[in-house]
Amino acid sequence: MDSEEYSESDSSYEDIYDESDSDEDTLDAARNWCRIDQENLAPPPPRFPFSGNPGLKTRMDGSSPIEFFCIFFDDDIVGYIASETNRYAEDFIEKNDLTPSSRVQKWKDVDSSEIRVFLGIIILQGIVQKPLQKRYWSQRPLLSTPYLKQLMSEKRFSIIMKFLHFTNNETIDLETHPQPGLRKIYEVYDAINRKFKSSYVPERDVSVDESLLLYKGRLDCKQYLPKKRARFGIKFYQLCESSSGYIWNSLIYTGKDMPLWNESPNYKSTTNIVMTLLEDLLDKGYCVTLDNFYTSPELAELLLSHRTDVYGTLRPNRIGVPEEIKKGTLRKGEIVGFQKGKICVMKYMDKKPICILSTVHNTVIVEQDKKRKKTHGKSERIVSKKPQVYN
């Protein structure tokens, strides 16, 4: 599926994109869509040279899950959470008229060790699921989780949950805050996000997609996405390493106050989202895979100007897509493609039309093997032909 690496003999593709060649035909190919001759295919465009330095960038003495966890939730972050939780509890006690019997009167400050235990219990509750939180401390043999009682009492857990805090309310200024929609968690979220980026550098192939964190409470930025499994929740845009799924960068959708990359006000929000996630990986020869929510000729040209390749499914109604891709009809198995510089746009008819954009593939068709069961129990080899990029 991957195209060949860049070589000196392939420098003409850069010449085309940079428009440094005086030949009118070459410039025309760079500026306008040219239909691809399926009977006389040119080689796929080469990838940009990769200058990244992938791999783990932090020292580890072992490889246990807790050691990986502590890379991201280090002493500074956990200590900050403990400090802000204590600050919020003290402020609450000072500003509220509490009865002598209130459990809040018995509040004791938390430290980093107790916050780590608290977070461990939260993670365990995601693995051992029960309908009510108090069931984890149930005395009934069929419902009890004995180990949790050894770690922390139910009363202590619930009061820490009540006062758990991630920011100083007194210092929040909505006019100057970098992302007001995340003001309650921004410092911790930003610190963890930076840890993900500094602890590991991804391999050349990365991907951008969105995910939905289930949440049905009150929240300004809560989204409803009926096609997602959770349907209701907090939407994340994530940049991941393709081979491992490692989340290298992420954005939380908060509406218009999202801090997006924006060199021009004319770029679409989907273009700015991808450029924001990729910003620290630009000009290093990375290749990003996208779905049709993000892919567009506009984004492809912008990424190429930053020596970054891209491929993914494409919505035919995107601005800049050739008219024959938008309106042309094909029979099953047929393909039509157009080239502009390194950018190849193709439309293939499978069970339904599929549009793809790529800067590292051509429209070559390859055979794929499939098997299907016959009624008498034997299998038959079925060969189908599809674009290599669609493999």
Image (cartoon, grey):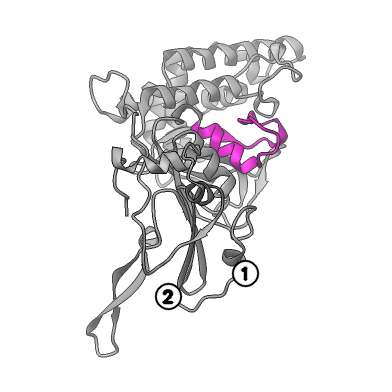
Q: Residues within 10 Å of mark 2 (few under 14, many from 20)?
A: some
Quarter of the image that includes the N terminus: bottom left
Residue lying furthest front in this view? 23
| Relative image position of residue 362 (x, y in whole percent) | 39, 57
| Relative image position of residue 343 (x, y in whole percent) | 48, 50
Q: In the image, is residue 207 above or below residue 227?
A: above
At a point 58% along the width and 23% down the height, the residue shown is 159
Amino acid carrying label 2: it is: Gly
Q: In the image, is residue 326 above or below residue 263?
A: below
At a point 70% along the width and 11% down the height, the residue shown is 171
Asked whether residue 274 is drawn in magenta, I would say: yes
Q: Which residues are magenta?
A: 250-278
Q: Which mark is residue 285?
A: none
Residue underneath mark 2: 333
Q: In the image, is residue 9 above or below residue 373?
A: above
At a point 55% along the width and 35% down the height, the residue shown is 275
Asked whether residue 370 is drawn in magenta, I would say: no
**Does dot 1 land on a helix, a strand or a loop?**
helix
Label whose residue precedes the other's in the sequence (1 or 2): 1
Q: Residues within 10 Å of mark 1 (few under 14, many from 20)?
A: few
Q: Between 102 and 290, which is closer to the camera in this rendering?
A: 290
**Does dot 2 land on a helix, a strand or a loop?**
loop
Q: Is residue 299 left or right of residue 136?
A: right
**Residue 177, can we see it?**
yes
| Relative image position of residue 22 (x, y in whole percent) | 49, 40
- Asked whether the beta carbons under mark 1 and mark 2 sit within 8 Å of each other, the answer is no
Amino acid carrying label 1: it is: Lys
Q: Which mark is residue 327?
A: 1
**Residue 139, can we see it?**
no
